[in-house]
Image (cartoon, grey):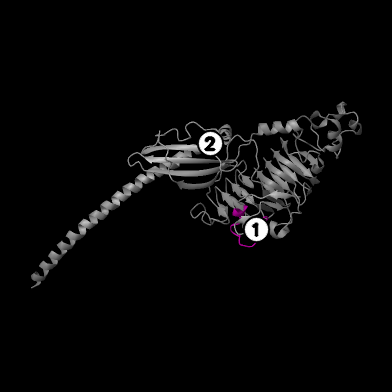
Amino acid sequence: MRRAFILPIVIISFLFLALVIPIMVKLAMRDTVAGVRNQKKSIAFALAEAAVERGFWKVKSSTSTFSSIMDGSVLSGYNFDTTYNDIDGGVYRVRITSGPLSKEITIVGEGRDSQSQETRAIKVIYRNTTIPGAIISGGMLTATGSSIVHWGPIMSMGDMTLTGSAASRYYPRKLSKGVVSPRDTNGLNPPNTDNLEWWSDYDVPELPMFDFATLRASAAATGTLNCKDAGGGGGGCPWWCAWFPWLPACSGCGGGGGIECCWISSCTYSGAPCTNCSITNFYNDSRKDKDYIWYWDNNASWSGKNGVRGTIIVRGNLSISGTDRYCSNCSLKVPQDAWQEYMKIDTSASNQYPGDTGYKSNASTYVLGSCGHSCEGSASGADLGVYGFVYIGGDFNRTGDSDIYGALWVVGNVSGSGNTMVFYDEDLELPTLNVILVKQSWQEVSASTQTWI
């Protein structure tokens, strides 16, 4: 009886397997075909990425190459006029053009799988930004409560530490190749960001390599190299130099002498590098509005009424005391995407930060001090000490005000009880030995119909 039941069960089992196994084999074959197809698509995609990468490094190869592209020149080998086959599995080509906006270049890379002829294309837009952040550091960076930054990110190649009230201030973006502390509790282990305010293990853009020789030569030509105060608004020249500027005693300010040196300018030049150069009442210098390069080979200190427009290069330490006097209630240009620095706090309300006009939007200009402490984060006094870029090769000590419209790069440490408020200017330009490319957008696009060579 039991054997009679076993035989039908065996037969039914064989029938079931006979039906199921072919289906399973067919599904497996379909998955294999799909896997091969996806693999080939991945090969084409990887080749397209390699094409963009090749174009990226071509643009960065020299400042003259970038300038040539911006002038509208077509680079041989980078206009879909060359097919590259140096990567196994297929070929790729590159096109580099200027635009769509000023200082931007567009790189389109196409990759083709050698077997399936599957083609993929990627378009990336980069912006040449000499100074990519409001405050940048080539090493570790400590952001203190008395340092407030608007409109541009803080960047560091090392760890970034937030202390005091900076730890509870949720702007601007913090970008670090190391760890942003105390935000990041995972170290370098994912997740490394909240995708709003802080990013650890971030691909921080390459830092600029300044052409210090060119910067120094420019300062020498304008008499703003190693300036030092010689005791008063008269520049240290005897009173009679106003009438007899050719006398030896009247050879200050790079040897220029004359009324500008002795009666208006507050700066003299000794003809040799000075150490611990000091300037009192920088604001009184007649050249404060000329957008010159001011260069010190060693240390510098400012006191009294501080105010200048231009590029400040201090290869040593800089100390600032006194007050900001460059401009009051001046109108500043707001970067188009300044709102990105405030994603953690941004709502539909306005005036949450300088220039705020609502959710993910900001005005094109902002009058300094117009919304005061409520949106600037500190009482700025509606004035600036520097309208431009400040580079400090050593330490920065501020016991007075030192507000900046531009950017600040301190190689050493920042100390002192003074306030430093930085409003980022994205249009800063300085002579550099390298090209800084910051990615603006990335997207996969349809492949070109142009015939492959």
Percent position of residue 347, x then y: 61, 62
Where is 295 relative to 135, above or below?
A: above
Q: Position of residue 321 (x, y in %)?
A: 77, 47
Residue 114 numbered tag: none
Furthest residue toward bottom: 1
In the image, 361 versus 327, the foreground residue is: 361
> Which quadrant would the C terminus be assigned to in this image?
top left
Position above or below: 184 against 61: below
Amino acid type at image mark 2: Val
| 238 relative position to 214: left or right | right
**196 sits to left or right of 218:** left
**Residue 62 on the magenta segment:** no
Label 2 element class: helix
Q: Which residues are magenta?
A: 338-355
Q: Nearer the viewer, residue 334 or 218?
A: 334
Q: Is residue 345 magenta?
A: yes
**Badge 2 local density, few (<14 within 10 Å), some, or many (20+)?**
many
Q: Residue at label 1?
A: 357
Q: Quadrant of residue 81?
A: top left
Label 1: few (<14), some (14–19) or many (≥20) C-alpha neighbours in 10 Å: some
Looking at the rendered structure, the secondary structure element under dot 1 is: strand
Magenta stretch, main secondary structure class? loop
Q: Amino acid at mark 1?
A: Thr
Which one is in front, 91 or 168? 91
Residue marked by disc 2? 59
Quadrant where the N terminus is found in the figure = bottom left
Give residue 397's position: percent from left, percent from top. Answer: 72, 47
* Gap between marks 1 and 2 measured at Cα: 36 Å
Tell me whether the residue at label 1 lies in contact with that at label 2, contact meaning CB atoms closer than 8 angstroms.
no
**Position of residue 350 measured from the top left corner of the image (x, y, whole percent):** 66, 60
